[in-house]
Structure formats: structure tokens, C-alpha cells
Amino acid sequence: MTRAAGVGARIRALREARGLSLSALAGEAGIGKGTLSELETGQRNPTLETLYAVATPLGVPMAALMDDHDGAVILDEGIVTVRLRVVREEGRTTEVYLLRLAAGVERRSPAHVAGVTERLVVLTGSGEVEHDGTVQAFGAGEHVSFAADRPHAYRAGADGFEAVNVIVTPG
């Protein structure tokens, strides 16, 4: 099974388990019904943005949709995300990713499920994160923490950045 087919099968199974139609999930995720259909059948490779958009209305962390192994990679335009570790415990899921954004790239994220927090530990480069109507600049060696159950965005500076992104989802 290809990576796209595996992700699509997980999306379909979660959608059906929640009793959602293809149209209902596409509408809640803000993506086209055709796009969602192509994802579910493995005809389209998922982008990071699409995975986040679908995970939120399904009420699951992004890790539930990705290849379920450490080292899984999601590539998007100017963005590389590598799953380093996922810890599932009673009451929470902690996802740890290596996040690389090329110079000048922005990644907007819709609100995650209620109670989700993110911590970004910057390894190299610089950029800024926008959340709750504020913009926080960061550089190598710094960190930013924020509630991720509201829309937020990362923007890379002139040299891009590499960071460890820790996402904690309750429930």
C-alpha cells in the first residue's frame, strides 16, 4: 500500500466511524469534495495543510492520519515535516516533529481540536509565529508556546528555520 493510500484509508475509516458523509467532512475541513475523495482513494498525496484541515473536524491529532511510524515524512511546498515520536497516554497524545521551512515560506494552520498546545523549539534560522492576534519573532535557541486550538501561522525568515514542534492533544 502506498503512503497516500494508507493515509486515505485512515481518513475514510475515521470519517465513517463518525458517521460523516464525504460532503460533510469536506465542508467542515474547508476542502473540495473531489479533493477529499481523491485523498481517500489514494489518488492524491496529502499536504500538511490538508492533513491538519481534515484532522480537526475528525477530532484527532495529525499523527492519526499520517504513516503510523517514526520517520514518516510529509513534504509540502518549501516545508518538510518529519515525525520523530508520538506518545499516546491516558488523557493525551504528544506528537514530536522536526519542522523545516525554507526562506520566506509561510504555513498557516487552522485551529486544532479544543485544548491543543504547541511548543516550537528553534534549532536554526529565524522566523515568527502568529497566534491569538500577536506575532512573536524567534531565532535559534529560542522557543515559543501557544494554544493551537485557534488558527495560527509560522513564517520563516530570510534563511528559513529548523525547529522541533511538540503538539499536545488532550483526550
Image (cartoon, grey):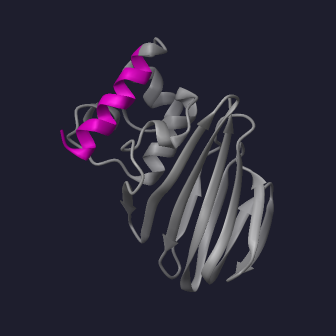
Q: Which residues are magenta?
A: 1-16
- At x 26%, y 45%, the residue is 3
Could you say where residue 147 lies in the image, as x and y percent from the top left? 77, 49
- At x 39%, y 47%, the residue is 69
In the picture, measured across the screen, residue 65 lies left or right of residue 1, that is: right
Determine if the magenta segment contains residue 128.
no
- At x 48%, y 29%, the residue is 27
Q: Nearer the viewer, residue 73 or 24?
A: 73
Q: Quadrant of the N terminus?
A: top left
- In the picture, residue 81 is in which quadrant? bottom left
Magenta portion: prevailing SS class: helix
Q: Quadrant of the C terminus?
A: top right
Is residue 39 among what the camera can see? no
Determine if the magenta segment contains residue 4.
yes
- At x 58%, y 29%, the residue is 59
- In the picture, residue 66 is in which quadrant? top left
Residue 152's place in the image compared with 110, above or below, is below
The residue sitting at the top extreme is 19
- In the picture, residue 133 is in which quadrant? bottom right
Could you say where residue 129 lies in the image, as x and y percent from the top left? 70, 67
In the picture, measured across the screen, residue 169 lies left or right of residue 21, that is: right
Residue 122's place in the image compared with 76, above or below, is below
Could you say where residue 98 lies in the image, as x and y percent from the top left? 52, 65
In the picture, measured across the screen, residue 96 lies left or right of residue 146, that is: left
Residue 44's place in the image compared with 166, above or below, is above
Is residue 22 among what the camera can see? yes
Q: Nearer the viewer, residue 127 or 122?
A: 122
Could you say where residue 40 lies in the image, as x and y percent from the top left? 29, 31
Residue 139's place in the image compared with 80, above or below, is below
